[in-house]
Every structure is written in structure tokens, then in C-alpha cells.
Amino acid sequence: MTHTPVEAQAVVRAAARLATALEEGRPVPPVRDLIGEHDIAAAYAVQQELNRRRLADGAVVVGRKIGLTSPAVQRQLGVDQPDFGVLFADMDVSDLPEVPSGRLLQPKAEAEIAFVLKEDLAEGDLTPARVRAAVAYAVAALEIVDSRIADWDITLTDTVADNASSGLFVLAEHRLTLDEFEPREASMRLYADDVLVSEGSGAACLGDPLNALSWLARTAREFGEPLRAGQVVLSGALGPMVPTPPGTRIRAEISSLGEVTAAFTEKAAPCEKRDA
């Protein structure tokens, strides 16, 4: 991916702006004034620059997230195509008793199906059958999305640059293989403090969460970072996302995958480190 000096400078400035949000614990203005609303390549270059910094600091990649797969979420954010971001090990809060609100700025939760891969998706023809066969198992998941952009005032380039608005994630323990579970037939209900706030289905995720996985497999390979065995893929929201301020309790039910829950700490601690 080649940029002119002006484009390269804009990428660095956009990355620096988003890094400021992380360092100072406050949202920043959108970056589309620097990279435009339609230059997706520049937006991914910003994401890659931020991820490069994280890797240099010792972060470990454990997978990817696919965003903007649900028409409902696309309508919420005013965009019309999927995107993807990188999952780092310290974003997995499945084993914590509570989700640390202090690591988040403007969190929202969405229920998803997560796939864990048993094979690389790096070479050859990435047919639907091959992508399906690469899945070791599926689990119910909560993606806690977060935006470093003030007031969630985002276009597609803003969210792509901001690691696809990634925050944290929670994986359930119950696992099913794709011989036991058909993702497109899943139904989902999401509760906040025991109130039903979001509903959806597997069909809401690009028609089938496996379609989203196939899209990611091809796109990640085009960017030179193909999916690898052992990685987690959050395949995309099954329904609208909901705000999760401190103290919120979230519970999602996804068909035979069962429940996945998260309780957010009552207070945000400003000194805690936040994730990209």
C-alpha cells in the first residue's frame, strides 16, 4: 500500500490523535478531516500504525473482529459495508469477575458468534466449504465496542482507523462444532439489567456469520495478514448494540450456544489503561 508524502503525514497525524485518546482517557474529534471519508486504504493504514505501536509495546494478537455486518448496526452508524479490527490478548476479559469500566470511554455491547479456528486461511481458494472446515468451534460472545471518537461521531474511515471501534470481549465457555450448530439459524436476545434491549438472528450478520468469516478471510489475506489457526474471530453483531455505562449487567442468549454474561464495574478508574 503506497501513500504520497501528504497521505503518509495524514496517517501519522490521525494515529497520533487516536493515541491521545488512549493516553489521556478522553475521546477526540473524528479523523476524517485528516484522511477523508472515503479513503479506506488510508483508514486501514492508520489502524495498522496504531497496531504496530501496540505490538512494539509487547501486545499479542489473538484474532480479529468483524464490524458493521448487521443492517441494524449499519443504520445506527450510517455506514454500508463491513470492516475489521485486530483483537489483542489483553482485550479478552472473559476470566475477569467484572468488565473494567475504567478501560473504556464510550462502551456499547453487542452479542455475537465467535469462531475459533483450527486451520490457517492463508493459501489457496478460500471457498465457503474450506472456511467452514477451518472452524474448530463456535461460542457465544459479547463484543464491548468502544469509540475513541467523541460522541460516536463516526464515518466508515473513522471507525476503521480506530481499530474498527474495538474495546474488549467476553467469550462463553460452552463450545459447539459446526456439526452441532448452524450459525445462520441462531436467534439472539440481549438483556441489560434484565430488560430485553436487543434481538436478532444469525441471518442479520451478512445473511450468515460464516459469510462474514469468509469475507474476513479474503480481506485479511489481501492485507497481508491472513487468519491463523488458534485465532478468535468475532463474526459481527446479531442485533443492535446497546450502551453499557458503569454498573450495567449484560446477558445474551444465543440459541443452543447458550448464555454469555458481563457485569461492568460500578466506577471507571481514570488511571486504568485503555485498549485500542
Image (cartoon, helix red, strand yellow):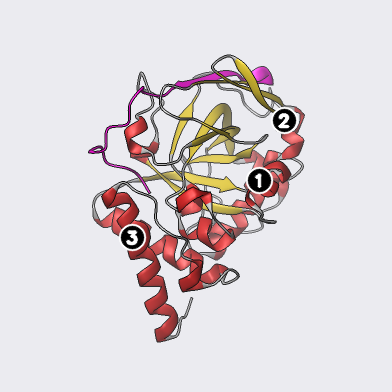
Q: Secondary structure at mark 1?
A: helix
Residue at image point 47% right, 22% down: 248
Going from the N terminus, do you reach mark 2 or mark 3 first?
3
Q: Decide whether residue 145 is among the magenta residues.
A: no
Nearest the viewer among 204 and 134 is 204
Q: Secondary structure at mark 3?
A: helix
- In 3D space, how far apart are the residues under numbered discs 3 and 1 (Cα atoms)? 30 Å
Q: Circle 2 is placed at which residue position?
A: 200
Q: Secondary structure at mark 2?
A: strand
Residue at image point 67% right, 29% down: 178
| Residue 40, x across and y down, in percent | 56, 67
Mark 2, residues whose alpha carbon is within 10 Å: few (<14), some, or many (≥20)? many
Residue at image point 53% right, 41% down: 233
On the picture, is 169 further left or further right than 136? left
Query: Tag on residue 52?
Result: 3
Going from the N terminus, do you reach mark 2 or mark 1 first?
1
Q: Nearer the viewer, mark 3 or mark 1?
A: 1
Q: Which residues make up the magenta segment?
A: 254-276
Residue 232 in sight here: yes
| Residue 219, x across and y down, in percent | 59, 59
- In 3D space, how far apart are the residues under numbered discs 2 and 3 (Cα atoms)? 35 Å
